[in-house]
Image (cartoon, helix red, strand yellow):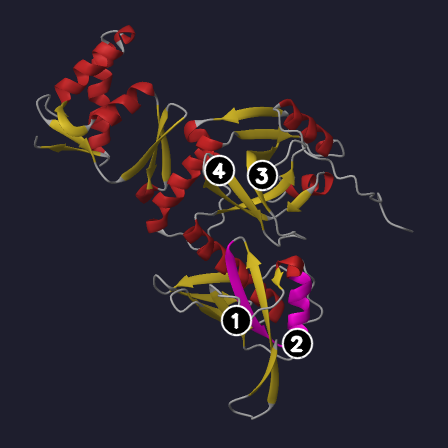
Amino acid sequence: MSIETREALTGAARTIETIGVQIGSVRVLIDVDPPLAARLRKRYLEFVVPHPGADVSPRMRLTSLVHGGTHGSRALAFVPRLRLEVLDDDRIRVVGDCQASLDLSAGSGVLEAGDGFTGMDSLVRLSLSLLTPADGWILFHGAAVELASGGWALLLGRSGAGKSTAARAFVSYCDEMVLARPEGGGAEAASTPYWNGRPRRAPCRVVVCLERSEAPALTTLTGCEAIRSLSAHVVRYVPRDAADRTLFERLCAVAARVPVVLVRSASGDSYPTSLGHALESSGFAPRWNAAPRLQGGLS
Amino acid sequence: MSVPLDDHVRRTTKAAWQELDGETVLLVSAEAKLLGLNAVAGRIWQLADGTRSLAAIAETLEREFAGGGSAVRDDALSFVDRLVARGLMERCNP
């Protein structure tokens, strides 16, 4: 959908496109210039809702006042330096490389300055972290990989813990952030667009906390240790005391329903194999990615 | 200051808690801490609902954890004192 607006001060015509994005149960509408719209479509791929319009009831509408395209030199991996200022329960300011504001009660956000692509992507991430808890989700730093027996294993870990390497070796649906929530007698997981994610939901069969170590080991975590490990990987850009107890109860509910294991592995070429064997030994064999891959380059 | 044996004690709302894998897990939001209580500590936590005196709690523990010897009672009283000092338990009227 595209509409034409006019700049208030200059009267210049400006075309705005609206993109709908759905992640888990959160829908976001994004109003941006066509060049930025094209980049965001590539970013969110299958998470883009085909026909944003009357049939979509967004939880958040994000508008970019940044126009004229984006900084072409900025790579996808550009990580903006941002700081959040919590004004009150509903309003948050983003300052740093991008300037933006988010109003939860109004369900709207505005990107005012900075790089359009990274600014809007940051607003979507922030919206995701703030809106998904209302639907019972926990947002984790983690990857979702498919198990040979069906369902997913969530691989949680800090940057460098081996999530992305594992996500390439196994059939995966996202490898940076993943959603999980207690559901019935088990747990449900949903993928996010980050990185190269594909929108899927599946039963979560096991949660695996990854750590690098020269002394490989697999330990089943229980009680406080399980909650401590899970909580270390929760994505919360804006900590809220009032939400702490709900999050705690949710983490306990997930840990009560699915096993939580800690896998320590050494880095190196054999890492995916050793991780796969460790998971297999605990009864959660991952489905290996059979897609052909080139080691090195074409040249 | 030790809690008198005749006083009733109860959990405060400073900590959220859940039972998980036979362990009592406490979240103390103000301290951003997760605490795990072992079986004896968890039982004290459960019993401290304001309906029992500290003496009654100690007697229950002595009975249920008889294998722990005479130290069970002293350890329990000391544990309650520490939780009261930390604001996680409080004295209350029956």
Name the residue tied to disc 2. Answer: A34
Chain containing mark 3: A
Which circle's residue, 4 or 2, is located before the other in the chain? 2
Tell which tag, 1 or 3, sits nearer the viewer: 1
Q: Kindly indicate whether the residue at mark 4 contacts the one at mark 3 (C-beta within 8 angstroms).
A: no
Q: CA distance from mark 2 to mark 3?
A: 36 Å
Name the residue tied to disc 4. Answer: A230
Chain containing mark 4: A
- Residue A263 visible in this rendered orientation of the protein: yes
- Residue A81 visible in this rendered orientation of the protein: no
For the residue marked with disc 4, what is the amino acid? Leu
- Left-right relation of A26 to B10: right
Q: Kindly indicate whether the residue at mark 2 contacts the one at mark 4 (C-beta within 8 angstroms).
A: no
Name the residue tied to disc 1. Answer: A54
Location of residue A20 in the rendering, given as x and y in whole percent from the top left corner: 57, 66
**Image quadrant containing the N terminus of chain B:** top left
Location of residue A290 in the rendering, given as x and y in whole percent from the top left corner: 79, 39
Magenta part of the chain: A25-43
For the residue marked with disc 2, what is the amino acid? Pro
Location of residue A289 in the rendering, given as x and y in whole percent from the top left corner: 75, 39
**Image quadrant containing the C terminus of chain B:** top left
- Left-right relation of B16 to A23: left
Name the residue tied to disc 3. Answer: A154
For the residue marked with disc 3, what is the amino acid? Leu
Which circle's residue, 1 or 3, is located before the other in the chain? 1
- Left-right relation of A44 to A85: right
Q: How many numbered discs, if any?
A: 4
Chain containing mark 2: A
Location of residue A119 in the rendering, given as x and y in whole percent from the top left corner: 57, 67
